[in-house]
Image (cartoon, grey):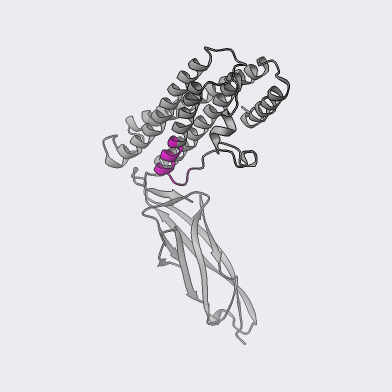
Amino acid sequence: MHKPLLFVAILLSLSACQAEKADPRRLQALTYSLEQANELEIGENLAIWQQMRARIASGLYGRSAQNPAIAQLMARYDTIQMGAGLLREQLRESRQQLRKVPPNQPLSPMQHGVVNRFLGQLVAYQATLHTLDKRVVLPHLVPPTLAGNASSADFYFRDATVAEALAALAQLEATVLTSENAALQSQSIVLACGGNIVFDRVGAWAIAESNTVAAGTEYRADLVLASSLTIAGMTMSANGQPIAVRPGGAGRVRFTADPRLLGNRQAVTAHWDGLIRVKSAYTQSGDTTYKVRVPYHIVRSK
């Protein structure tokens, strides 16, 4: 949809209009393009919401919609979707108010109140999404490189004409839809992975404090499930021995580098085996296991 490019074009047009009092039809054309792109994304977001509801209703995840964990996830889905729906309704009302007057006319105090109220509701909606999922990445209301010291309200609506305000509302609608989509996708991952996810973080990997240890000293590393999620009920082991999983989702790997592996050599490459097991909350197919073999070097102590 190339919304960032459209947004830049709108900003350039805003500057041109203010400097030259240009024909507002250029802004109206840009606004129309953004609104058409937004309509497509409204349909995409609605489809995500409907598909996940249908999958749950059909028992695809092995539990009914009455199950408390499933019901909580569905409540999050509905909060995300309904919040965006209320914003779109407010947006329609704002547009109706603005389109009653000529496009070159400056915003009246009443119209400023209308658009600023919508902006405030968008801020509150993004705050709600962060409350539901603190790891979801939401778009900035104003690109940081452009905002300066201006508030969102000043950036979009200060000294704006009706045509400029309508273009800004179209861009803010795109922000609503991007926020909604990010939150819905995040909850879809939660549901697909069993509903027992604590927060975002699929494969096992390790971060060693050092890849070289002296014989007889302690090797240290963190074992994590990376590029995926930190999941409740996850267990880990290193070389067949259970290890503690910290709240951040990393397992503490500690063992003594065995001097016998050196033999008569000054240094030797060894390895340890990490295993992460994730229990499925919704299916009877058993655990999912991720394995990693981690090389390290043992050197003779001086």
Along the line of sight, the residue nearer the viewer: 201 or 16:
16
Please give the range of residues in magenta: 124-136
Asked if residue 270 is among those painted magenta in the image, a careful observer would answer no
Residue at 44%, 26% (x, y): give it: 87
Residue 111 percent location from the top left of the image = 50, 21
Q: Residue furthest bottom?
A: 302
Q: Where is the N terminus found, in terms of image quarters? A: top right
The residue under the point 45% across, 18% down is 93
Q: Is residue 36 above or below residue 84?
A: above
Position of 53 with respect to 180 (left or right) is left
Q: Position of residue 260 (x, y in %)?
A: 54, 82
On whether residue 135 falls in the magenta region, the answer is: yes
Judge whether 83 appears above or below 193 on screen.
Answer: above
Q: Quadrant for residue 11, please give it.
A: top right
Tell me residue 145's x, y (percent).
Answer: 65, 41
Q: Nearer the viewer, residue 39 or 202?
A: 39
Q: Residue at x 49, y 35 (%)?
A: 179
Q: Quadrant of residue 212?
A: bottom right
Left or right for 261, reference 237: right
